[in-house]
């Protein structure tokens, strides 16, 4: 699991990031880990809330969980849809407990990052150096 690291000081990309996960705790932890590198950190625990946020804000960066719950589209499906629908999204990262479950990575997804705590890969995939 990601945690806040006060010793890591990458270049700040700025802009607005949306973190989508069905776990509010994951949203909080990832949000805290990224808050120093973005102007705005927004979180959502469902696709419906996410779409409302995307409609009302200019979001340049997106981190979306692969599995958002039963009977819901996968994060992979949502990222592809949202990248076409909301052109402000420059980078999209799919967050997953098991990268193998994702399978084929469409071009709309910049990176697949495991939830196991690979913070540097997450930072790098969002353009934080």
Image: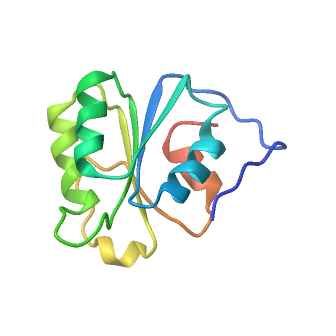
**Percent from the top left, x then y, of residue 17?**
45, 34
Residue at image coords 48%, 55%? 24
Residue toward you, 118 or 45:
45
In this rendering, the answer to whether 64 lies above or below 118 is above
Residue 35 in percent (x, y) is at: 62, 35
Q: Which residue, as the protein is rendered here, is positioned at the far right?
A: 7
Q: Nearer the viewer, residue 73 or 12?
A: 73
Question: How many numbered marks does the figure carry?
Answer: 0
Q: Where, by quadrant of the figure, is residue 57 drawn?
A: top left
Q: Position of residue 111 (x, y in %)?
A: 41, 54
Horizontally, is 32 left or right of 56 in the view? right
Q: Name the image quarter holding the C terminus.
A: top right
Left or right? Give the position of 59 relative to 34. left
The answer to whether residue 41 is above or below residue 96 is above
User: In this rendering, is residue 54 above or below 95?
Assistant: above
Q: Quadrant of the N terminus?
A: bottom right
**Which residue lies at the image location 62% right of the left edge and 31% below the top edge?**
37
Q: Residue, x 30% and y 52% (percent of image)?
A: 46
Residue 60 % position (x, y): 38, 28
């Amino acid at each position: 699991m990601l945690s806040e690291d006060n010793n890591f000081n990458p270049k700040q990309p700025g802009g607005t990031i949306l973190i989508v996960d069905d776990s509010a705790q994951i949203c909080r932890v990832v949000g805290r880990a990224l808050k120093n590198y973005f102007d705005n950190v927004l979180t959502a625990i469902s696709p419906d809330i996410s779409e409302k946020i995307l409609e009302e804000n200019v979001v340049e960066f997106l981190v979306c969980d692969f599995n958002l719950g039963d009977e819901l589209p996968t994060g992979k499906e949502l990222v592809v849809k949202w990248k076409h629908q909301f052109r402000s999204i420059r980078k999209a990262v799919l967050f997953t407990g098991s990268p193998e479950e994702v399978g084929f990575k469409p071009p709309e997804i910049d990176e697949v990052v495991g939830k196991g705590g690979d913070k540097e890969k997450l930072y790098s995939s969002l353009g934080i150096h």
